Amino acid sequence: MKIAVISDSHIGQRISAFPPKFIGELFQYDAIIHCGDFTNIAALNIFRRNDADFWGVCGNMDDAEIVAALPESRTVHIEDITIGIMHGWGSPYSLDERVFAKMAKKYPDEKFDVIFFGHSHIPSGTLVGGTRMLNPGAVSGNVDEKFGSFGILTIESGKIEWKIKKILPRGY
């Protein structure tokens, strides 16, 4: 199974719309995870109309409609892999550790293999408490770069592979 993992779209704030080529590619994956900051309901509805499985959470910049429609965090089980999803908050420093601590407290019976988060606009991959903490960066553009990014998670026979793909947010 191949899953596109995105975050920080900021549609209507940082970019006016998802680049058409990006949307065309996105819907070729088996599933999509969005780690928050869609910023408006029209951006969220793009994923609701798709045939791929979709799991999303709200972010700190999302409007009231999105906050009402999506949870702050969630868990997903695919094959034997347990995935957590949360946006994040505050400083980018130690964000992975704060997200891990909050997810562990909220879901004490889960043993996460992976937790996806966003907020920092910085693609990253760390290990916290035995859990892979993965941030796909921002579709709308990463800090100090003209490129945006998203992640591709491949789950095959209980094993995971992760890679980051760069995009041009305004002309992909």
Image: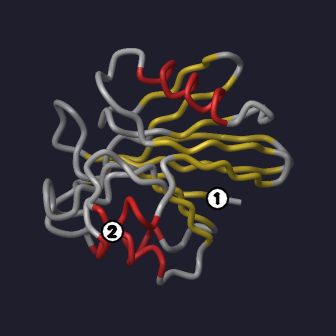
Q: Amino acid at mark 1?
A: Lys
153 left or right, relative to 112: left
Front residue (pair 163, 132):
132
As drawn, 113 above or below 3 = above
Residue annotated with mark 1: 2
Identity of the residue drawn at 15% across and 64% down: 12
Judged by depth in the image, the label closer to the viewer, 2 or 1, is 2
Residue 148 tag number: none
Spot occupied by residue 136 in the image (x, y as percentages of width and height): 43, 42
Near mark 1 (Cα within 10 A), the count class, few <14, some 14-19 or many ≥20, is: some
Task: Determine which quarter of the picture holds residue 15.
Answer: bottom left
Residue 53: x %, y % from top left: 62, 70
At horizontal 64% and vertical 27% (from top left) the residue drawn is 105
**Residue 142 rendering spot, x and y as whole percentages:** 25, 39
Few, some or many residues within 10 Å of mark 2 (<14, 14–19, 20+): few
Residue 127: image quadrant is top right
Q: CA distance from mark 2 to mark 1?
A: 29 Å
Residue at left 25%, top 49%? 61
Q: Amino acid at mark 2?
A: Glu
Q: Secondary structure at mark 1?
A: strand
Q: Residue at x 51, y 18 (%)?
A: 97
Q: Which mark sits nearer the N-terminus, 2 or 1? A: 1
If the image is split into quadrants, where does the C terminus sit? bottom left
Numbered tag placed on residue 65 in the rendering: 2
What is the x, y in percent for residue 158?
A: 84, 44
Q: Is residue 103 above or below residue 159?
A: above
Residues marked 2 and 1 touching at CB (< 8 Å):
no
User: Is residue 18 shown left or right of residue 110?
Assistant: left
> Dividing the image into 4 quarters, which one contains the N terminus?
bottom right
Q: Is residue 11 above or below residue 99?
A: below
